[in-house]
Image (tube, grey):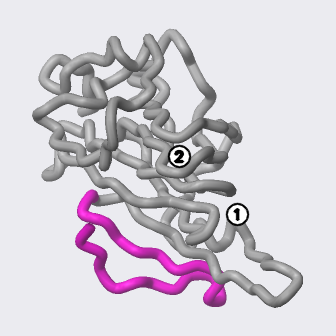
Amino acid sequence: MNATPAIRCAMDAIKKISTSLPGVFILEPRVFGDERGFFFESYNQRSMADAGIAEPFVQDNHSCSSRNVLRGLHYQIKHPQGKLVRVVEGEIIDVAVDLRRSSPTFGRSEAVRLSGENKRMLWIPAGFAHGFRVLSEKAHVLYKATDFYAPEDERTLAWNDADLKIDWELQGEPIVSAKDQRGVAFRDAETYN
């Protein structure tokens, strides 16, 4: 990942780290910890706005997956969702693929490790496909979405498309749902203007 210098937002509550994809960035919250445990703000509207996330969130999702489960790459064509992704337990490789034809990074991906330990969050704006693979024994993944889930509008990009060159850091065959096994090749996928 080619991260640019970090930007501090909203009274030092969160650090923003750019990625190689315009609009996709990592957020590192300020964590307060002692012998009792830790505390941090996982969401603050003011901090998010300062970081560049102005869209309102309308839905929260929580998934629990076992080691080597691979979910994605999902997106909605008519009701695109921005997603703020974090892991509360375990570790994943989280992936965003740029599906905006007008973007200079169209067809490129970014992979970021998110874990309960590093407490990082990944902002993936509308116009990207999203997926993840579980690295730990189990992972609880939470994400906020800027539009509602619309099953009739959902599309799935092939997670293993050779043109995308995504390094999922596989150790054996991943566990993939029947729906995700039917994902389409990038060259045949519906994309955004």
* Dominant secondary structure of the residues highlighted in magenta in the image: loop
Residue toward you, 10 or 182 = 182
The residue that disc 1 covers is: 43
Mark-to-mark CA distance, 2 and 1: 13 Å
Q: Does any portion of residue 76 appear in the rendered image?
A: yes
Q: Which segment is the magenta one?
A: 1-21
Residue type at mark 2: give it.
Answer: Lys
Q: Which mark is residue 78?
A: none
Please tell me whether residue 22 is drawn above or below residue 32 in the rendered image: above
The residue that disc 2 covers is: 83
Magenta stretch holds residue 9: yes
Magenta stretch holds residue 82: no
Disc on the earlier residue, 2 or 1: 1
Q: Horizontal placement of 14 versus 102: left or right?
A: right
Q: Does any portion of residue 102 appear in the rendered image?
A: no
Residue 24 location in percent, x, y? 37, 58
Q: Quadrant of the C terminus?
A: top left
Number of numbered discs? 2
Residue located 76% across and 86% down the image: 33
Residue located 27% across and 43% down the image: 98
Residue located 50% across and 37% down the image: 81
Residue toward you, 82 or 96 = 96
Please tell me whether residue 61 is drawn above or below residue 84 in the rendered image: above
Residue type at mark 1: give it.
Answer: Tyr
Helix, strand or loop at label 1? It is loop
Q: Horizontal placement of 86 versus 157: left or right?
A: right
Q: Horizontal placement of 21 versus 34: left or right?
A: left
Helix, strand or loop at label 2? It is strand
Residue 83 location in percent, x, y? 53, 46
Q: Quadrant of the N terminus?
A: bottom left
Residue 149 location in percent, x, y? 60, 25
Q: How many neighbours does mark 1 have within 10 angstroms: few (below 14), some (14-19), or many (20 or more)?
A: few
